[in-house]
Image (tube, rainbow, N blue to C red):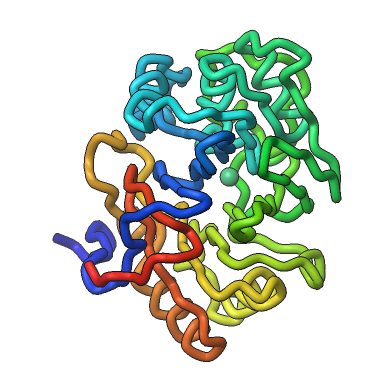
Amino acid sequence: MKFWLSRPDLAGHPVQAAGSGDVTAWFLGTSSVLLSDGDTAVLTDGFVTRPGLARVAFGRIAPDPDVVRRAVERLGTPPIAAVVCVHSHYDHALDAPVWASLTGADLVGSESTANIGRGLGVPEPSLRVAGEGDVLTYGGFELAFVESEHSPGDRYPGTVDAALVPPRRSREWRTGTVYAVFVRHRGGTVLVHASAGFRRGALHGLRADVVYLGVGTLGKQPSRYVEEYWDEVVRATGARRVVPVHWDDFFVSLDRPLRPLPRFADDLDVTMRRLSALAARDGVEVLLPVAWQPCDPFGERPRTS
Ligand SMILES: [Zn+2]
């Protein structure tokens, strides 16, 4: 196979070990992460429909409620209180309103996310718009929002200014606000930082134990950029563990094993090489997430795949 069509290999990278703790985490591909303490759960994005490339490029897309329902069941019907969209592109916000409707959770995000929720009939009292520095409490979880930037080359910039009723073209899920979301719990703090952009200094002084670090398109950035991104997100928060996310090919079903995007789109090998060097420098652990597998985001020693 031609090099640019080939895909990086996941073998050899340490992965998160199965387990559970005060907080248990499930990774659902892209930047979808479910965190639960048994009484309350919060979900970022919940993008599980994953329409195929041809449909995304040329057709119209809509959430598939059956796929979301099956995901809810596979996860054991978790007590989801909030579904948070880290921004409003379709690969983050397509299914979030369906999760909210099925579970009765709030849909949390920007005004654009709220309009995406309105398009699917999420009731107004369940729509929460998060501003810079806002903190929302759900059970034992505290969600703190810091505005951030999309990774370079945002393909669908702008906002969603009216209720978005699918099916629609994928480009109509416009960015809205991009958030860094600190999920705080007595067990520890997870920072979900889904997009590989940053605002200089924005996270300084905020603490996280673990960062779910968006690495989409990072393999195409100059190493200087990767280093600055690391410093602004990982080093700035003092995190000791990094879980790279948004590296998987999201045009294929989550029923199949995750695979990285082909090299013409991104290059996870390059990304992992650079992150590993920065991690070694700073004494940070880098662990790839495993789809659907419960894990303790703070504990559990890693195993090698
Ligand atoms: Zn995006």
- Residue 151 appears anywhere in the view: no
**Left or right for 92, reference 272:** right
Image vertical order of residue 68 relative to residue 2, above or below: above
The number of discs equals 0
Q: Residue furthest left?
A: 1
Q: Residue furthest bottom?
A: 281
Image vertical order of residue 193 relative to residue 70, above or below: below
Relative image position of residue 71 (x, y in whole percent): 37, 27
Image vertical order of residue 59 relative to residue 38, above or below: above
- 249 or 100, which is in the foreground? 100
Taking the spot 51% from the left edge, 25% from the top edge, the residue there is 95
State the image quarter where residue 222 is shown: bottom right
- Answer with the quadrant where ligand 1 appears in the image: top right
Relative image position of residue 81 (x, y in whole percent): 62, 29
Q: Quadrant of the C terminus?
A: bottom left
**Left or right for 236, reference 291:** right
Taking the spot 61% from the left edge, 26% from the top edge, the residue there is 172
Taking the spot 53% from the left edge, 70% from the top edge, the residue there is 221
- 73 or 277, which is in the foreground? 73
- Residue 126 appears anywhere in the view: yes
Relative image position of residue 226 (x, y in whole percent): 57, 75
Image vertical order of residue 113 relative to residue 62, above or below: below
Taking the spot 47% from the left edge, 30% from the top edge, the residue there is 78
**Left or right for 49, reference 127:** left
State the image quarter where residue 115 is shown: top right
